[in-house]
Amino acid sequence: MPSSRLPPAPSAPAAPPLVRTRGDRRTLEFAPGMIQSEMLLSRPDQLVLRYARAMMCFVLFQPRPRDIVMVGLGGGSLLKFCHRHLPWARITVLELRADVIALREQFLIPADDARLRVIHTDAVAYLAAAPACADVLLVDGFDADGLPPALGSARFYADCRRALRPDGVLVANIFSYDPRHDAMLGRIETTFRGHVCGFDGIAGNNHIVFAVNGDAARPSRATRVRRLVAWRRFAGLGFLNRLLARLLVRRLSRRGAPPR
């Protein structure tokens, strides 16, 4: 992987993130009412938001990833869950905004250690220079205006595929109402040669897309899972995916990832 000493990219001018605490709940918002992350103070490692639970379904494709790279820190929900419940995995988080990283203690994000690095850098440049660095790549880098255009370009998705090892999986969070939604999905489909499925309706307006860096001639576990998820979607059984995400996260919290 590239060194964590990469010079950070300058942050674009933006309103400071809002941290709100109401009883046992603490939220991070990039605009009033736009909740980016939510945490229970009593259980900071729990995944509160449905879209975060849906993104954790990457373990169906990669049950024991060695390296997880995350684009976007936010309140660190996915980071904290993976750090606690996937102890064999190394986690690298790429965050563009220094003011978001500065909130790390407020969201009880653990300090960097041998398994965890939070890097202040531009994920676009980082991934372009990091071939085969990840088994799982989670793209959830939103700002107050939504998903930045650079994180939905054909070039970015090509760099994402190069950053993945064989059978590695890209997990992309795309708003269903984003006017670029269809174009971004088309770019992912093209880049990953159709090895793509999505969890529609699992988390409101969040469309969770899984893309596998696989070989069509070799039906791996990831390919079989992808076909199953796609069948459920087209069969109108999206509620099964919602149930699957909840049960899978519960199992990870109790016993660890499913065996290979």
Image (cartoon, grey):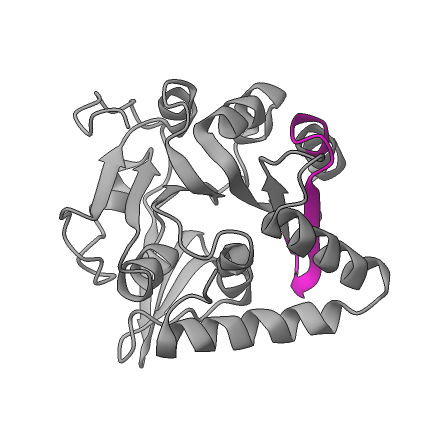
Q: Between residues 172 and 101, which one lies in front from this camera angle?
A: 172
Task: State which quadrant residue 5 falls in.
Answer: top left
The magenta stretch spans which residues?
189-207
Magenta segment includes 219:
no
Q: Position of residue 148 (x, y in %)?
A: 52, 32
Marker count (numbered): 0
Q: Is residue 245 above or below residue 165?
A: below
Q: Is residue 36 above or below residue 194?
A: below
Whether residue 180 is visible to the viewer of this picture, yes or no, is no
Q: Residue at x 48, y 45 (%)?
A: 140
Q: Is residue 184 above or below residue 21?
A: above
Q: Position of residue 238 (x, y in %)?
A: 75, 67
Residue at the limit of the structure toward the front, as seen here: 218
Q: Between residues 75 and 256, which one lies in front from this camera angle?
A: 256
Task: State which quadrant residue 70 falls in.
Answer: top left
Q: Between residues 232 and 125, which one lies in front from this camera angle?
A: 232
Q: Residue at x 52, y 30 (%)?
A: 151
Q: Residue at x 24, y 35 (%)?
A: 119
Magenta segment includes 192:
yes
Q: Is residue 94 above or below residue 114?
A: above
Q: Position of residue 236 (x, y in %)?
A: 84, 66
Q: Answer with left or right where residue 192 lies relative to residue 75.
A: right
Whether residue 232 is visible to the viewer of this picture, yes or no, is yes
Q: Position of residue 14 (x, y in %)?
A: 38, 35
Q: Residue at x 54, y 28 (%)?
A: 161
Q: Answer with left or right where residue 250 lies relative to residue 236.
A: left
Q: Quadrant of the N terminus?
A: top left
